[in-house]
Amino acid sequence: MFVFQMLSSASSVVKMPRHCFFLQLFISLLPLFSSGGNGSTFFFHKKDSDVFTRDHVKVNCSEPICIGHYREIYCEGAIMWAAWYFGLQNECPGNRMRFEAEVILKNFDSSFDQQGRLYREDFRRFCKENFDDRPYLEEAQVKDWTADLGFLDRITSPKMKMFATAIHKIWPQLARRFVDDVFEHPDRYPFLAVPYTFLIPGNLVQMYYYWDTFWIVRGLLLSQMKETARGVLLNMAHVLQVRGHIPNSGNIQSVRRSQPPVFTLMVRDYYEASGDKQFLAEIIPALERELNWWRKNRTVVVHLESKNEQYIAYQYRTMANCPRPESLMLDYYFAMESSRDDLEFIWSSTNSACESGMDFSTRWFSFDDNDEEMAYTRKGIRTNEIVPVDLNVLMAANYRIMAHFFREYLENPRKAKFYEFLAESVSEAIEALFRDGSGGIWFDFDLSERKLRRRFFPSNIFPLLLLDWSKGDKAKDCETVIRYLNESGSLEFKGGIPSSMERGSVERWDFPNGEPRLVHLTAISLLKCAQFNAEAYPMAKRIADGLLTTAFNGLFNPRRGMPAQLWEKYDVRFDDGRSGFEGNYIPQTGFGGTNGALMDLIKIFYTKNNNKNK
């Protein structure tokens, strides 16, 4: 939807739509007209379509992507649909409104003739007169970056030292700040500006994103950039103050969905690196505000008849139930093609999958083998009926950390006890809902079918992250996980562990893609078993080495014809650094989340005196 800037230049706008030519090809093959069972209709763009009318679109959905004065310009309404109808969605609306929203909407209405027709050239003229495309970010200096880094001297492998040095040099290239005009005219931009320098994830996404920041902060702390990391955390606190939660990104189009709740973990990492108790005391209200939001908006009560017990668990479940403006055509098409009549459920589940950070994966799709057309495809998306194990692990970990903060550093035993209670409650739900029998592996829970979703995903072992607090048989749990991974087939690949084993999928969070963030979480989960099982550390290192090898080769020994880059995802079938398939997106370079994950894995496995169980 918006114009994105190339990584090499934040001062000039370059026409670089995030969606790649595969999306444009897909759209060109769509039928001219599509009709849904609930009365939703839309005439798709055709090359010779020069006239748009309001009758061309009727989308029945009740909860918009965003609210406020931006809603009918950037999130829903005839301007959005006209742009897609004419194939101009990468040009209009631009990233700055020249007038107030009410004026722009009136000008749009005036662009139609007396018969209610809007011609292509009149729409282009409207866009040019009412919007600007201008840089909203600029490159920022990170004053605490230094080439002399003590962390590098502790690396025992010359190859990994060279690799970490190269990653360390990337951080200044990703640093951005909002231009002054965004602060001076905040109502004209569809972004929430933040006061401090932040790091963009990669070359195509000129905006701050939530859960990528967890790995970015880890990398910054290893690079001894504590002040930059501190500013990033204060940005998050600012967003919480304004929005009441941390959205997916700073873009208004993602304001009603969050991402995996890792803010508390980021503050934990920063405190361990800085020991800044005053900062902790100042930011703790923001942490509480976020966790309160998740408790209020993302919990579900699950009744288990087998135990006659009820448990409170957490879901990704957005209120927005309309097509996403950045992928309007695809969202509309998949809903029209679905055998499910409830289009709002499909669109809400699509937004919820984005909230998970894993958009898209068969993890959120139907597994019904009797419905070949819907199963394992986006037509059968049902995120809102799935309770994910890893989200509940994150919430339990957040509560444990909060209890520790209040008990050990903030001298508030009452609040410490409160968060200990919440942590214990979620931990009990994890064992009751997600555990496959007594002492088995953990799987996502299906609310509709009342059963576990027994497919391989790395998240199946993430409850090991809670092992330090477990009251169960830790050695047995570790033995179960080691056996499960050995039997899953997921360890057979040169480039690390895949994001799933669904070989027929075309989604970017599935096989053959390996996601560095998931590889990192898998490795540190296994390390929790190092003191209980002799196979755990070698297995974790083997998984990490697969990613480190292919990422190293992609940067220093790229395949012929490929640029020397670090990628968001890698193809685990190879160790030559080739990028993973990115679905509707151009493969992203940069990449903040990858950089931080790689640096932390180098620290864990290739530095002196590192605790194997940390």
Image: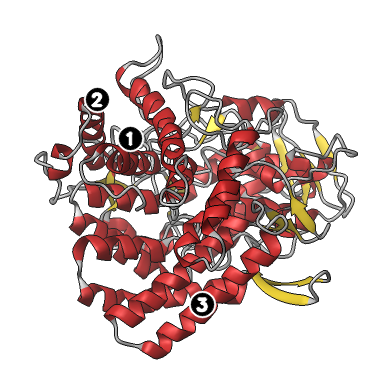
Q: Which residue is mark 2?
A: 159
Q: Which residue is mark 1?
A: 7
Residue 499 figure quarter: top right
Give residue 251's position: percent from left, percent from top.
47, 54
Give residue 40's position: percent from left, percent from top.
82, 51
Q: Which residue is mark 3?
A: 292
Give residue 124's position: percent from left, percent from top.
55, 39
Q: CA distance from mark 1 to mark 3?
A: 36 Å
Q: Nearer the viewer, mark 3 or mark 2?
A: 2
- Residue located farthest toward the top when viewing the structure as drawn: 560
Inspect this view and state whether residue 337 appears: yes
10 Å neighbourhood of mark 1: few (<14), some, or many (≥20)? some
In this picture, residue 56 sits left or right of residue 612 = right
Residue at 62% in and 41% down: 484
Q: Is residue 165 above or below residue 104?
A: above
Which residue type carries mark 3? Answer: Asn
Q: Nearer the viewer, residue 179 or 188?
A: 179
Residue at 52% in and 58% down: 474
Disc with the residue nearer the chain's start (1 vs 2) = 1
